[in-house]
Amino acid sequence: MEWAINVACSSCGAAFEASRFHGPVIETNRTTIRAGIAALEGRTAEALCGIDMATLLDPSDPEVQTVAERSREILVRIGAKPFIERLDAAMARAATTRAALPQR
């Protein structure tokens, strides 16, 4: 049953995306639908985990960078701008941290 809901929601989301309607309310609805579909597919948790990793671990670590890139792709696709900004800020710490370390 769950897969049927996912397929139905994805189909509705695709139809809504293809519509020629525009405006602030429509764009807000599109963002909400994208977020709902992502949540049904379990991708939101993956993206939020990536933000946590970038915030709590060393953002220059290759594994953290890989997860952060995937998280950013998900967040961009669903239009989650505040979360993208949070992820970008956490990843920017890598350059700041490296610049502050003494050279050997």
Image (tube, rainbow, N blue to C red):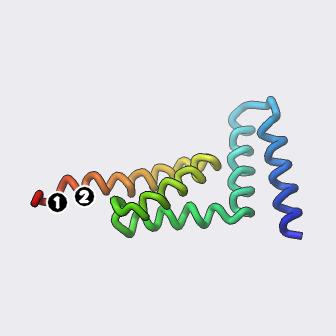
Q: Amino acid at mark 2?
A: Thr
**Which residue is at 71% across, 32% downward?**
23
Is residue 67 something one can see in this rendering? yes
Residue sitting at 82 percent across and 60 percent down? 6
Q: Position of residue 70 (x, y in %)?
A: 54, 56
Contact (Cβ within 8 Å) of mark 2 with mark 1:
yes
Residue 89: x and y in percent read 39, 53
For image coordinates 69% across by 43% down, the residue present is 28
Compared with residue 52, is residue 22 higher up or lower down, i.e. above or below?
above
How many numbered marks have been drawn onto this rendered protein structure? 2
Disc number placed over residue 43 in the picture, else none = none
> Residue 97's mark?
2
Judged left or right of residue 61, residue 96 is left
Using the rendered view, name the quadrant where residue 94 is placed: bottom left
> Nearest the camera: 14 or 62?
62
Q: Position of residue 69 (x, y in %)?
A: 49, 53
> Is residue 76 found left or right of 22 in the rendered image?
left
* Residue 98 in the image: above or below residue 14: below
Task: Count neighbours of disc 2 (C-alpha within 10 A) and say few if under 14, some if 14 to 19, many if 20 or more.
Answer: few
The residue identified by callout 1 is: 101
Identify the secondary structure beneath mark 2.
helix
Identified by mark 1, the residue type is Leu
